[in-house]
Image: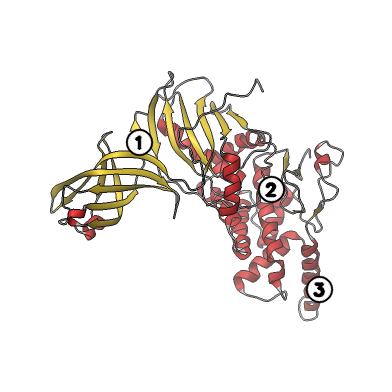
Amino acid sequence: MNNLPSALRPVYTTDNPNQTILLYDGLLEISSHINQHPVQIKGNGKLEYIWFPNPCIKFEFFNQDQDIDDISYAHFHNHPISLTLLDTGISIDVSIARYSSAGNDGNFVSGKIKKPVVQGKGQDLAYVLFHVVNFYDFIEKPISLLEQDSSQWKLTLDQLDTAANNVKSLNSQGGFAITHVGKLEKLDGQTFSEEEATEFLKKFADFLSFARGFRVPLILLVGYDAEDNEIWQHWDSSVGHSWKSVDSWFPTNNAKVLADVFTNFLDWWNSWDESAKLSLYWYLEANNSSLSEQQIILAQVALESIAYKEGQTQRYASEKLRGLLEKYNIPVNIPFNRPSNQTSTFANAFSPKSSIFGEKLIELKEKFAEKLEEETKTKNIQNLRKEIKQVDAPYLFTQIRNDIIHSKEKIKKLEDYLFEASDLGLWYLELVLLAIFGYQGCYCNRLLRYRQNGETEPVPWYNI
């Protein structure tokens, strides 16, 4: 415990899920132009970080001394509007959502910010604190230390005292809550700029999202100098998924896995082009979807984009997927085999009561084989017999996707197998990404039926 960093204190917290966070309360000024003449309207108001319908920063403006009847609702929507926080002198572009002029009862305007609210100078930052929304409640690992040597960054991730209760509430009601606080600094103690910080934290947000299984926002950045003086704040709206109980590869009882994967994740992020990195976006959207058909389609889009990047250019989608999986020693034959190194300590993580899910896939494999056997009576027997031998997991997955897209009834009651097929595609996608990241540890296998909380197993290519 003495080797762990000291606990981090958040600047902002949510004691309960979906709690609004007050960012500013004071004098405001709305500015615009009417017929090329400037108009400024002063009043009181506030800025708040809200969660619904989407996480964003909302403002509310109240005015009783100055009538705003001469500014029409249409003008608010068709002309640039800026909002100045008069107590700080910060001006920001905003969009108007509501507007009312009620005479003696006062005036009301509300809307959202269009660009980040930045206060202070962010060119000589010693460290930055940031707030993580909707991440896992760690088991036995309250603090996780991440150090990225090649880029000289040091990251500390700390779970808040309120995280466990918030996660319990989120599991029952959904929504958003700050669960962790993080600290970004340089390993050598040198200062850095706000541009460096925000660019790096965008990557870290994508990485945490990959671990969580849906999009995790990093919000409300606060920068400090070497004397621990607050010198910079960065408030921005964000993109994040509402809390949902979804499977992912990340073992919550072993938080140090984050450090094991993050280094190679950064290498991948910096070396792949934007179109290939969309595979992560498709994974997050698929894993967060409640429709098995959508999960299957998006997972195949992601897998095909990766396969193309990895040099798999075969004619058929099943061949591309099979080639990609075999390249990384990921099982393709049904039923799936466990990792070959059964004598390793990692293999002991297998629970003898847990079986690899696959009964439905075995059944579906037999149905496809029977269907192909019937077709040999009217089609090219040699080609069909070759196809029958290729009825493995990649074949089944791509055929199911084809039947969804092209509405062909190749197998009756295909809907009975959609859940298993969607889990298969997401399992493959997680494993392919972990293999590309060079991960050699344990993960949570979504195909294990009756998996206990925290139960893990070694990746299929472990020690090969």
Q: Dot 2 surroundings within 10 Å: few (below 14), some, or many (20 or more)? A: many
Residue 246, image x, y percentages: 63, 52
Q: Looking at the picture, which amino acid does disc 3 mark? A: Glu
Alpha carbons under labels 3 and 2: distance apart: 30 Å
Residue named by callout 1 = 118
Q: Is residue 42 visible?
A: yes
Q: Looking at the picture, which amino acid does disc 1 mark? A: Val
Closer to the eye: label 3 or 1: 1
Residue 108, image x, y percentages: 26, 52
Q: Quadrant of residue 145?
A: top right
Camera-side residue of 185 and 14: 14
Is there a contact, CB below 8 Å, between mark 3 and mark 1? no
Q: Which residue sits at x=80%, y=77%?
A: 376
Residue named by callout 3 = 370
Image mark for residue 431: 2
Alpha carbons under labels 3 and 1: distance apart: 64 Å
Closer to the eye: label 3 or 2: 2
